Amino acid sequence: MQKKLIIITITIILFVIIIMGALFLKDKNKNYQNENVTIYLFRGETCPYCENALNYFKSTIDNYPNINVISYEVWNNKENAQLKNAIIKELNIPKTSVPLFVIGDYYKIGFSDNGQKLIDKALEEINNENYQDVVANIIKENNFNLTPEKITSNS
């Protein structure tokens, strides 16, 4: 009788250890990382702040292989402007000008001397399990004839 009780106790302990280990490994291997995150830049062709943003990203983007920067010129391109207007509506942006940046469902209007906060936000979104690329979703839902420009150090 005591021998059966010891065997049952050891079996229960081993079962609990195995279950706990499996749960630990499952949680440890849980990966919310997104393969890539995109910073969308809506800009005007002769806007000096937009030009500063472009230059900033051209000089730094190669340091961040998981971040894409896509630019849309909206002052001279009606289709790109329609996309911007759809995003304004979707994100309930109260007023806007250029440059307008969109990362997931986050937006920022204007550009100061340092775009590092935008890079930091994109890096944060890489690990966000709830990240949704709002711009990509709007593009998929509509039949825009867009003219995007992927920003690289060579562009």
Image (spheres, helix red, strand yellow):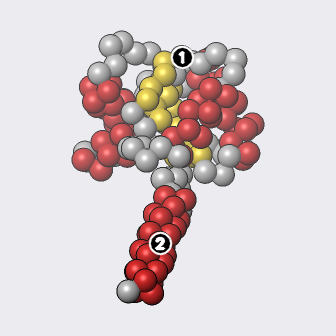
Residue topped by disc 1: 110
Q: Are marks 1 and 2 in contact (CB under 8 Å)?
A: no
Q: Give the amino acid type for the residue marked by disc 1 in the picture.
A: Gly
Q: Is residue 150 visible?
A: no
Task: Residue at the far top: name it.
Answer: 95
Q: Secondary structure at mark 1?
A: loop
In the rendered structure, find residue 13 and report the number of the disc placed on it: 2
Q: Earlier in the sequence, mark 1 or mark 2?
A: 2
**Residue at x-position 59% and y-position 29%:** 118
In the rendered structure, find residue 27 and report the number of the disc placed on it: none
- 120 on left or right of 98: right
Q: Is residue 131 above or below residue 65?
A: above
**Residue at x-position 25% and y-position 45%:** 142
The image quadrant that residue 119 belongs to is top right
Locate the N terminus and report the quarter of the image it occupies: bottom left
Q: Secondary structure at mark 2?
A: helix
Q: Residues within 10 Å of mark 2 (few under 14, many from 20)?
A: few
Q: Is residue 116 above or below residue 47?
A: below
Indicate which label's residue lies in the foreground, 1 or 2: 2
Q: Where in the figure is residue 126, as x and y percent of width and height?
A: 54, 46
Which is nearer the eye, 101 or 152?
101
Locate the C terminus and report the quarter of the image it occupies: top right
**Residue at x-position 33% and y-position 31%:** 87
